Amino acid sequence: MTEAHVDGEPTPSDVDDQPDEQPDDQPDETEGRHDPAGLVGGPAHLGTPGPPLDRKAPFYWGFFGGLGLFTAWWLFNAVQAIGATLVLIVVSMFLAAALHPLVLFLERRGLRRSLAVLTVVLMVLGVLALFVVAIGPVIGDQVAAITKQAPDWFAALQRNDRVAELNDDYQVVDKIQAYVTDGDFLGNLFGGVLGFGLALLGAVVNGLIVLVLTLYFLASLESTKAGLYRLAPASRRDRVGRLGDRIILSVGGYVSGALLVALCAGLSSLVFLLVVGLGQYAVALAFVVALLDVIPMIGATIGAVVVSAIGFAEDVHIGIACVIFFLIYQQVENYLVYPRVMARSVELPGAVIVIAALVGTALLGVVGALLAIPTAAAILMLTREVFVRRQDLA
C-alpha cells in the first residue's frame, strides 16, 4: 500500500521529472558570449564539427591529383609560350655576369660602383658603335663578294673528276648551286620578302632587348644578389652568399674567357688570311671564325671548314695552307690558350664539357651550347661544396 498525498502537493517523482526553470529576469549565461571567431553565442550554437576529410578516399586523391596535373600543364604551356623571352633574359644575365669582373676591377681602382657601371656601359656601347661603323660595312661588302664569286667556285668544283662523279650520282653540287645562286635565296631562306624583313627586325629588336637587360642586370647586380640571399635562412645566409658569389664569378670568368679566346682566333685568322692571299675576304672570314669559335666543341671546326672550302675554291695551295694553319692553331688553342684562360674560371673534366655541350645544344641550340659549360660548372661546384661535404661528415 502506498501512502496517500494531499491533493495539489507534488510527489517527489514529479519534482524530479520537472525541468529547472529560471526566472525571466535572470540573464542567460551564453548571451553576449563571443568565441575567438567573433560569433555570438559561442561554438555550441554552430553545431558539432564533423569528421575531417578522408585523405585516403579515391575522390580526394582524384580531385587534387587532377588539379595538380592541370596546374602543371598550365605552367608548362606558360613557360613554353615565354620560352624565347626566357632565353633573352638568361643570355642577358650571363652577359651581365661577364661584365661584372670589369666593374669590380674599376671599383678596386677607386671608382664608385655607379661610375664603374657607367664606364663599362659606355665602353660596351663604344665598341658596338665602332664595330657597326668601321667593320660592319667591310663585312657586308666581303659577304657580297663571296656570294658573287660562288658560281665560279661551283663551276671549278664540277671540273674536278671526283666531285663530278659524286655530283652525277647525287646531284649535290647542282642542288647547292641552285639554292645559293638563286636570286630569291634570302627570300627562300627566311620565307619571302616579308619573312626576311620580319626576321631582320626581330634580330634587331632581340639585340636591343638583350643590350638593355644586360645593362639593367649589371647596374642592379649587387642589390639583386642581396635580395636573393635574404631568402635563405639567417643561419645559412653567409654560406649561400659565398656560393652565389663564386658561381657569378665563375660564369663571368667563363664568358669573358670565351670571348677572349674567340678574339684570339679571329685576329690570328685575319693575319693568316691576309698573308696567304685571301685578303679580299679576310675580315668577313675572320669574323665568322671568331663568332663560331665561341660555340664549344664544334664551333672552331665549322669555321675552319668554311674558310678551308673557300681557300680550295680559290686555289688548291691556299686550301692546303688553310687546313694546315687551322690544324696547328686548334692544337695551340686547345692545349695552350684555352686552358690558361679558363684555369681561373671553370674546372671541368673533358667528359663533362662534352656531355654538357651536347645536352645544351639539344635543348636550346647554339644558345644552349654557350650556356651549358658555365651551368655545368656551377652544378658541379654546388654538388662538391654541399652534397659531397655533407656526405663526408655523415
Image (tube, rainbow, N blue to C red):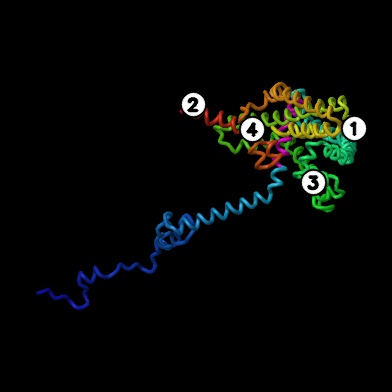
Q: CA distance from mark 1 to mark 2?
A: 61 Å
Asked whether disc 3 touches disc 4, contact meaning CB atoms under 8 Å apart, the reply is no
> Where, quadrant-wise, is the N terminus in this rendering?
bottom left
Q: Is residue 93 magenta?
A: yes
Q: Earlier in the sequence, mark 4 or mark 1?
A: 1
Viewer-nearest residue: 66 or 349: 349
Residue 262, quarter of picture = top right
Amino acid residing under circle 1: Gln
Q: Is residue 10 left or right of residue 52?
A: left
Q: Earlier in the sequence, mark 1 or mark 2?
A: 1
Asked whether disc 4 touches disc 2, contact meaning CB atoms under 8 Å apart, the reply is no
Question: Badge 3 local density, few (<14 within 10 Å), some, or many (20+)?
Answer: few
Range covered by the magenta-colored residues: 89-107
Question: Badge 4 local density, few (<14 within 10 Å), some, or many (20+)?
Answer: some
Amino acid residing under circle 4: Val
The residue that disc 1 covers is 280
Residue 392, label in figure: 2
Q: Earlier in the sequence, mark 4 or mark 2?
A: 4
Asked whether disc 1 touches disc 2, contact meaning CB atoms under 8 Å apart, the reply is no
Viewer-nearest residue: 338 or 127: 338
Q: Position of residue 298 (x, y in %)?
A: 71, 34
Q: CA distance from mark 4 to mark 2?
A: 28 Å
Residue 22, label in figure: none
For the residue labelled by badge 4, is the local secondary structure a helix, a strand or a loop?
helix
The residue that disc 3 covers is 175
Q: Earlier in the sequence, mark 3 or mark 1?
A: 3
The answer to whether residue 121 shows anywhere in this view is: no
The residue that disc 4 covers is 354
Q: CA distance from mark 4 to mark 1?
A: 36 Å
Please state which of the two labelled residues, at mark 1 or mark 2, is closer to the viewer: 1
Amino acid residing under circle 3: Lys
Q: CA distance from mark 2 to mark 3?
A: 61 Å
